[in-house]
Image (tube, helix red, strand yellow):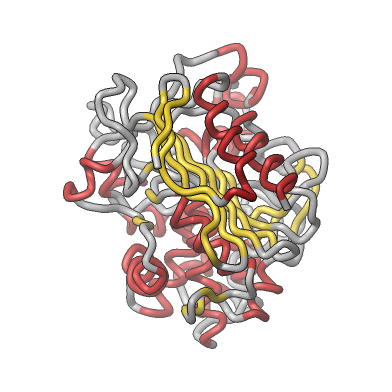
């Protein structure tokens, strides 16, 4: 069913019980500047909301379709964690065994005893690489990135503090998976998670999906706002060291390709295996995946994780001031945990999931047995954007 709302046509299905979610989704376009977006909710594993609207491009020439996909950014960290935790379920790796047992080169620079658990909880001290990397290495060469991380000395004592591994998390966990299975992360996610669940989730894909892929639309840079949010990025790297330098290099090493080939929305970006940052999916798929976790790890007979592993995954591993972001964060095993009053995932303390750049979100609420996801293609606030706040509040008001 399609109905007009402002400049957007709302498509899809919404149970009457969740009519307030639909109304807030309409308001996102009429009042909160959404361009293209989708919201989906599962309850007890069954879809109760599946709505989409708007445009795939800034010029508003390509409507957002039912099967549209968009870059979901750091939501990919949670899916990478699921793939790694499935290995723990199978007994192929152990959380408290040294990473170097699976990846021998990782023993360099004092990391011989660093356990897999620290990679998943952002406690490993490896958010950045010190030595200069070739431009675009994060998109062009998995081996360059993992070799550099294997040689990197931790920026802080592992286990004694945590800091967001914004762009290295996927390489670290993904290389452990590759060493343990002989398979690439992108293939494992597709073959063992996405296809069995019947969902779209790609860590790199070919041109066959370009027509249904939303362009990422970034507003003009607000230098003053960026300086307030990420003040360390304004510093000259030559004038700092230690964690201060790591904060800068986490976002600037490797530098981008000089010809723009690797920019967001390019074919190279979409094809790359860059699991912390460039996976593409949609709200329906993420709600189904997180909905399975909210129901003990399975949906429709497909097991994502064992019930015991779901419980372990959402146990707090690290909490407090984030050494990289300079604000409070809270992590389980690869998942962001709810932080009441700061970055909540609804009202219940057991909720867990992951935000993505610019307001995207997927999470599981085991208390209500809900999987929720909102995706969009116009960047906004990564911390508590008005669009996802309104949808989440309406969802809980309906329960």
Locate residue 116: give its quadrant: bottom right
- Name the one closer to the observer, 188 or 117: 188
**Residue 2, quarter of the rendered image:** top left
* Closer-to-camera residue (160/199): 199
Q: Position of residue 324 (x, y in %)?
A: 66, 40
Query: Percent from the top left, x then y, of residue 287?
Result: 52, 56
Which residue corresponds to the image point at 65% horizontal and 73% vertical from the top-left?
A: 310
167 lies left or right of 366: left
Looking at the rendered structure, the number of numbered marks drawn on it comes to: 0
Most extreme residue toward the bottom is: 91
Residue at point 59% right, 33% down? 23
Residue 196: x and y in percent read 38, 74
| Residue visible at 59% across and 58% down in the picture | 371
Q: Is residue 387 above or below residue 396?
A: above
Q: Is residue 173 left or right of residue 246?
A: left
Q: In this view of the protein, can residue 216 be seen by the observer?
A: yes
Image quarter hosting the N terminus: top left
> In front: 317, or 106?
317
In-image side of 5 versus 160 (left or right): left
Residue 110 visible in the displayed image: no
Name the spot of residue 98 as percent of width and height, x first: 59, 75
Position of 67 relative to 236 (above/below): below
């Amino acid at each position: 069913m399609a109905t007009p709302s402002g400049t957007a046509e709302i498509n899809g299905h919404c149970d009457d019980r969740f009519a307030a979610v639909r109304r807030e989704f309409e308001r996102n376009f009429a009042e909160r500047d959404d361009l293209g977006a989708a919201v989906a909710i599962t309850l007890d594993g069954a879809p109760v909301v599946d709505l989409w609207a708007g445009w795939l491009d800034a010029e508003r020439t390509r409507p957002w379709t039912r099967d549209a996909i968009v870059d979901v950014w750091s939501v990919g960290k949670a899916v990478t964690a699921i793939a790694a935790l499935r290995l723990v379920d199978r007994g192929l790796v152990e959380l408290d065994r040294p990473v170097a047992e699976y990846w021998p080169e990782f023993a360099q620079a004092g990391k011989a005893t660093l356990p897999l658990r620290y990679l998943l909880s952002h406690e490993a001290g490896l958010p950045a690489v010190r030595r200069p990397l070739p431009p675009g290495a994060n998109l062009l060469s998995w081996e360059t990135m993992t070799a550099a991380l294997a040689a990197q000395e931790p920026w802080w004592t592992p286990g004694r503090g945590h800091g967001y591994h914004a762009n290295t998390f996927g390489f670290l966990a993904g290389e452990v998976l590759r060493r343990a299975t002989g398979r690439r992360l992108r293939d494992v996610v597709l073959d063992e998670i996405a296809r069995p669940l019947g969902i779209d989730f790609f860590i790199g894909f070919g041109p066959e999906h370009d027509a249904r892929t939303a362009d990422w639309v970034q507003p003009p840079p607000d230098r003053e706002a960026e300086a307030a949010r990420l003040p360390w990025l304004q510093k000259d790297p030559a004038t700092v060291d230690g964690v201060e330098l790591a904060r800068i290099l986490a976002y600037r090493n490797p530098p981008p390709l000089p010809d723009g080939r690797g920019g967001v929305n390019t074919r190279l970006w979409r094809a790359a295996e860059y699991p912390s940052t460039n996976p593409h999916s949609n709200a329906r798929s993420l709600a189904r995946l997180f909905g399975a976790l909210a129901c003990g790890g399975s949906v429709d007979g497909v097991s994502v994780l064992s019930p015991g592993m779901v419980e372990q995954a959402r146990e707090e591993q690290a909490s407090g001031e984030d050494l990289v972001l300079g604000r409070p964060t809270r992590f389980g095993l690869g998942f962001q945990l709810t932080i009441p009053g700061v970055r909540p995932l609804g009202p219940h303390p057991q909720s867990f999931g992951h935000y993505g750049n610019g307001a995207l979100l997927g999470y599981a609420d085991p208390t209500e047995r809900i999987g929720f996801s909102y995706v969009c293609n116009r960047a906004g606030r990564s911390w508590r954007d008005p669009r996802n706040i309104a949808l989440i509040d309406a969802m809980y008001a309906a329960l």
